[in-house]
Amino acid sequence: MNTTIRLAGISGSLRQASSNTAILQTLQASLPAGVEMTLLPLDGIPLYNQDFDGPQPPDAVRQFKAAIDSSDGVVLCSPEYNFGTSGVLKNALDWASRPAFASPLKGKPVLVMTSSPAFTGGVRAQAQLRETLGGTLSRVVARPPVVIGGVNGKIQDGRLTDAASLTFALEAINDLVAEISLLRAARAPVSPPAERR
């Protein structure tokens, strides 16, 4: 049995020098032993259109949903635009939420992180994402929210260099891993008791 925990990291920004992507890449290089994270790109995912939401969705959508389905958990890292999450991330979650009540997100452990140049760190985007994920039946990790304020001064050379923010984010990753481990234990087959003679 493969004991490696596989995470899917999703940045809510398409910008090449995205702070959110930099945060995920820093976490990717700092994960504990036995945990891996693959970053899923969103730039090829089209706008949601129910006309194409069927057994044969666009290839980028199919690959995105398959990657979420095969992961043990998801890490979202989003900017805040106009008091909410980015359109590109909301669009991706809308695709991944299908089919309704039976999507790859149903029951999937999800950790939400946000960042912003403002001191608030994207708290309103965080709240919006939690509401959206409730609609997808995702298993959002219950913990103090990871919000990284003043992020522009905490990224250098494409990496999160603020020690306190990185430590807090890694503690959140540990909480996600613990949630995944609990689910694995709950789903493990129970051996029948030994027969007495």
Image: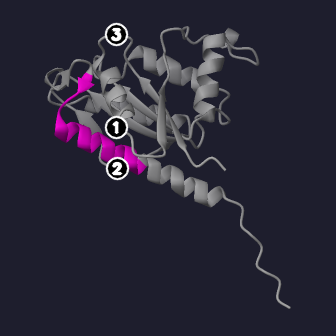
Residue at 15%, 26% in the rendered image: 150
Lower sequence index among marks 3 and 1: 3
In the image, is residue 118 part of the stretch drawn in magenta?
no
Does residue 176 appear to the left or right of 120 in the view shown?
right
Name the residue that disc number 3 marks: 15
State the separation of the CA atoms marked 1 and 2.
Answer: 20 Å
Q: For the residue marked with disc 1, what is the amino acid?
A: Ser
Q: Residues within 10 Å of mark 2 (few under 14, many from 20)?
A: few
Q: Amino acid at mark 2?
A: Arg
Look at mark 2 in the image and give the residue it sits on: 143
| Residues in magenta, as a range | 159-175
Q: Is residue 171 visible?
A: yes
Separation of residues labelled 2 and 3 (CA atoms): 28 Å
Q: Nearer the viewer, mark 1 or mark 2?
A: 1
Percent coordinates x, y for residue 101 in the rendering: 65, 36
Q: Give the tally of numbered discs.
A: 3
